[in-house]
Amino acid sequence: MKAQRNNEQDQVDLAAMIERASIPLLLPALVQLTGDTRWLDERYTPARPVGFSEDPTGGLEPQIRAEIRAAAVDAVTRWQKGELEPAVPDPEPTLMAALMSQCLGAPVPADYAPMLSEQLGLRPYRPESVREQLGAAGREFSVAVIGAGISGLAAARSLKTAGIPHVVLEKNSEVGGSWWENRYPGARVDVPSNLYSFSFGDKQWSEHFSQRDELSEYLIRTSQELGVRDAIRFGVEVHSARWDAERQLWVLSMTTPQGEETLEASAVITAVGLHNRPKIPDFPGMDSFAGKVVHSAQWSEDLDLTGKRVGVIGSGASAMQVVPAVVDQTAHLTVFQRSAHWVAPNDLYFQEVSEADHWLLANIPFYWEWNRFRLYWMYTEGMFPALKVDPEWDTSQNSVNGYSESLRRFYMDYLTRKLHDQPDLIEACTPSFPPFGRRILIDNGWFDVLKRDDVDLIRSGIAQITPSGVVTTGGDEVELDVLVLCTGFQQQRYLYPLEVSGIDGRQLREEWHDDNARAYLGLASPGYPNLFYLFGPNTNPPGGSYINLAEAQVRYVTDLLVTMARDGIGALEVREDVYTEYNERLDEANRSMVFALGRVSNVAPPRDSLPHLACHDK
């Protein structure tokens, strides 16, 4: 929560609270509050965080910490009394880079300053409003947003601010996307809550890593506070989108509670996400299973696992949350693992946010902002050095450079400590790819569960499903009462099952060969004017919060739509040569990243400029 003066501050022992504060967060906050740049001196520079580990002392000597805390008490006291106003509420890029570097204890390029100033709310993005211009010109211009999850809500907020007429089409009965649909036991975010949230949507999170219900409530409340719900049509599923070149608009075919309908819009933003269509494996005999089958994303609230023999297919993120959450209910639990993942410890994973932390975030000027920055860097940019393949490095040992090797050893040491008395499990749980070849998962009791006598880990493939259970490729027969599919989503089949027809009837799914989606900046494709993707191809981050990326994508798309509405541009599309050149650069970059070794293609695109787009007057 961003700091505000309030009477409750007088009831609090400020010195005691500041004693609980993080030194790396106080340093830039002090500069902004007082204007005193001595806090940027080298003697106050904290140690750089290692991995996801946090040290509130910053590794500084006690007398240095005491000096910083005393200055913070003095500055905040004067601010509370109204004797001091923030000296630098909106730092210019050079100073912002210095503040970021001091907070982190490592250099941060000034190039990051504009984006992070926006993300921290120091310089919030507000699009130009074209409401009056559209009204005065009598032009019809409207946008259809498909999906009311995180991206859709961010888009609706931005379009509303810009005064662009729009409708949000949501297939579910409520907002939230994946966080509305996924209700399996143990579901929670694997990114700190204060980072996995909108830059414009404050909340006092109850836990450092919030559970599904709190996240769902947050998204519903945010939609209410933003005033975007009137633009949302619930229970509407879009089946196809066809470009009408003569009229320069999209024609959407959809199923609504009232039946089949069509809707026309000047532009379309797809905000369908990557985790909204479960991937159901087609094992031989699947339909013959006599017990219950449930996908983790389609969990039945009345599913009773008490005393049941349960099989879980998969060992990724959802399985790692489901299994520890249900194991005490089951008679026996069997995990069918295709491949192991790197698993990181995190002491805060199940912890509630303390009252002291809540108070600091809500009452110390700029403390909330720098907490968000530090989390962002630790979980996003700070991990980038581990992704780059050193051409001189021997990658056969499951690492790609020196930093990658240090992470591999750290995760391996943790795995070995947890499973020290079961060498077979150590071997079974050791990944065959370097760290960040796939997203790092957080241990929420996974290793402890696998050691239990009533839990089996099977690495053989599945040959077939029988009425009574599973037969593996190794010939083992496992009798089951319930089969839980933690098999992920149709991520590779982007926009599936939506069918999109562009200029001259060209078919987007055919051009993508169904499961090889490509786009410029992950946002647009040539031949499909006025169509923009959020969470588009090659924009799934290997770590950190997608919400940061969603807001950046929405900013880019909104600026384009404002330009179209303001200047009377009827159709706008990315040029073929720019699209091709961008994807060649993306492929070249990927070839030098850990993704290539892990058979994953993921590169976050840079923001580019409007001249790369072909515009046509209305």
Image (cartoon, grey):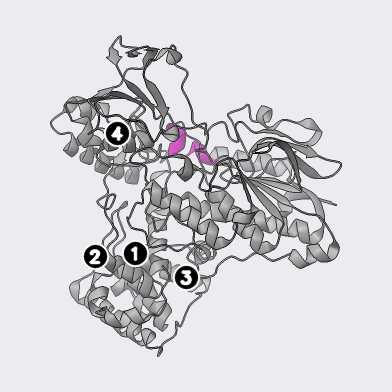
Residue 96: which disc?
A: 3
Q: Position of residue 168 (x, y in %)?
A: 64, 49
Tell me, yes or no, whether the two marked residues, 2 and 3, touch with CB atoms within 8 Å. no
Magenta stretch, residue numbers: 589-600
Instruction: Name the amino acid, label 3.
Output: Met
Instruction: Name the amino acid, label 4.
Output: Val
Q: Is residue 606 visible?
A: no
Q: Position of residue 566 (x, y in %)?
A: 78, 61
**Which quadrant of the view contains residue 24?**
bottom left
| Residue indicated by mark 4 | 323
- In the rendered image, residue 591 lying in the magenta stretch gets the answer yes
| Residue indicated by mark 2 | 59
Dot 1 falls on a residue whose secondary structure is loop
At 41% across and 88% down in the image, what residue appears?
Answer: 82
| Residue indicated by mark 1 | 105
Instruction: Name the amino acid, label 2.
Output: Gly
**Vertical position of residue 435 compared to residue 85: above or below:** above
Please identify, in this view, whether the residue under mark 4 or under mark 1 is nearer the observer: 4
3D distance between C-alphas at marks 2 and 4:
37 Å
3D distance between C-alphas at marks 1 and 2:
10 Å
Q: Earlier in the sequence, mark 2 or mark 4?
A: 2
Dot 3 falls on a residue whose secondary structure is helix
**Vertical position of residue 56 compared to residue 611: above or below:** below
Q: Earlier in the sequence, mark 1 or mark 2?
A: 2
Q: Earlier in the sequence, mark 4 or mark 1?
A: 1
Q: Is residue 365 visible?
A: yes
